[in-house]
Image (cartoon, helix red, strand yellow):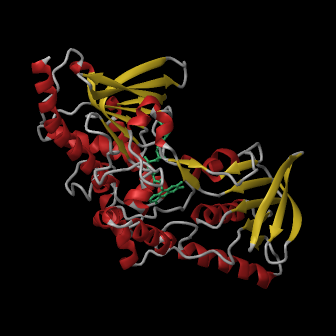
Amino acid sequence: MGVRVDSALAKDILDVVGIGFGPSNLALAIALTEHNQQGGALTARFLERKLEFGWHQGMLLEGATMQVSFLKDLATLRNPVSQFSFLSYLHTRNRLADFVNHKSFFPSRVEFHDYFRWCADQLSPLVDYGTEAVTARPVYEAGMVTHYEVTARCVVTGRITALLARNVVVAPGLSPELPAGITAGERIWHSSEFLDRVGGITDPRRLMVVGAGQSAAEIVDHLHRAFPSAEVYAVFARFGYSQADDSPFANRIFDPAAIDDFHAATEETKSALLAYHANTNYAVVDVDLIKDLYARTYEEKVRGVSRLRLLNMSRLKSARASGDGVEVTIRHENTARESLVEVDALVCATGYRETDPTTLLGEVEPLLWRDEQDRLRVERDYRVATGPEVLAGVYLCGGTEHSHGITSSLLSTSAVRAGDIVQSIVTRVETHAAPLRANAGTS
Ligand SMILES: Cc1cc2nc3c(=O)[nH]c(=O)nc-3n(C[C@H](O)[C@H](O)[C@H](O)COP(=O)(O)OP(=O)(O)OC[C@H]3O[C@@H](n4cnc5c(N)ncnc54)[C@H](O)[C@@H]3O)c2cc1C
């Protein structure tokens, strides 16, 4: 365990405040817990705006599976004997043998959500649920930024509280992205809220899904099955759904070791790598689902019923609520013609964007260094680079695709990343206590 900074406030200053308690900071909480079990004594609290743990609950569709091996759970790649592994979870749930017989590396999303929650429940004393981080400011001691004050708001009462932390780990996840000019409403939804909304639709005639990625294809599949008398329109600019590349060599881009290569690469190589391997993650679909949807369109052709309608080479131009439905204008790119379709609901499976972590960091933001393209300069250990006078750390889980590559927002490296961050914090606590003690001695 590292040496602690000696100040009047030190007992109230946490080593870590984590913003967000999704899988990224849950993996961090596990790594911190295991560090402390080995003799460490790092203190931490996590702020989560949701009232309880939840992972993309609007998309926990029946039958949907993980796009990552169960071995890339929250701990195993960092610590294969962790009590927080997926295997440990299965053992506790008395399903280990059943899972082995299942012969699958890819559990259902519902099961992985239950695994996440099982981990989160064990760590709940570290979490303030229903608490949203809103801003932060640096606190100076002897001319150095020794810690931050993080301001949080209770989402129920609006009460404001403040936490002091030597390190802030920002993991707010991704933010849903709607197409330009489209506003969500009663009958216009982003895919992230799909299951919360679809229950309110009864006996629809026509439904539409925009997007060509995994979520879009899953929702098309779900609607087509759930509403056997509705037409389901799938709208996307591509010619056809494209297959996700999960072949073994390409898949190595998700290995922890790939982050070393990516982080050390030139900007040119980084851009090339992101472009070469975009089809492992972006706007692609599992091949089994593609085949299943294709089989259904073929079957409908045979029967002479066309319920599953693919509008390829097409874009959503506008959508307007009208009575109990939505009037959607689609532009067909190949002919430049437009058509108006009336639907009972429009689902925009149009992806997410990185959440800008600096929106939560207030007066801390000017301390954080940026690169030539004005992006945060994130070191290999996920700490945002700062001047030497800033001893307190800001670490990012997510929002680092430009520096750490395609796994930034994914689960693949979350266990190892959590370990890297804990190691970095421990090392810096040790090295930074010395100058502070020296300053205290001369004042
Ligand atoms: C439907 C779907 C399926 C996916 N499946 C996979 C998969 O199979 N494999 C894979 O690798 N990736 C998958 N992903 C990618 C996904 O990003 C990761 O699975 C994972 O959610 C990343 O975890 P996170 O903790 O970084 O972000 P999130 O899971 O988004 O968690 C962030 C948390 O921070 C909270 N928060 C945000 N701002 C604040 C604030 N100001 N104060 C307090 N709390 C805040 C949010 O409420 C949220 O709970 C999937 C994504 C989606 C949408």
Q: Residue 88: in sight, yes or no?
A: yes
Q: How many marks?
A: 0
361 vs 414, nearest the viewer: 361
Q: Is residue 397 above or below residue 360?
A: below
Q: Residue 411: in sight, yes or no?
A: no
State the image quarter where residue 229 is shown.
bottom right
Residue at image x 19%, y 18%? 7
State the image quarter where residue 196 is shown.
top right
Residue at image x 66%, y 80%? 295
Q: Is residue 139 above or below residue 333?
A: above
Residue furthest to the top: 8
Judge from the rendering whether residue 315 lies leftward or rightward of residue 118; answer left or right. Answer: right
Quadrant assignment for the C terminus? top left
Quadrant assignment for the N terminus? top left
Q: In the image, residue 48 lies at what x, y percent?
A: 45, 34
Q: Is residue 275 above or below residue 115?
A: below
200 vs 403, nearest the viewer: 403
Q: In the image, residue 185 lies at what x, y percent?
A: 75, 43
Q: In the image, residue 360 lies at what x, y percent?
A: 48, 34
Q: Is residue 101 above or below residue 425?
A: below
State the image quarter where residue 340 is shown.
bottom right
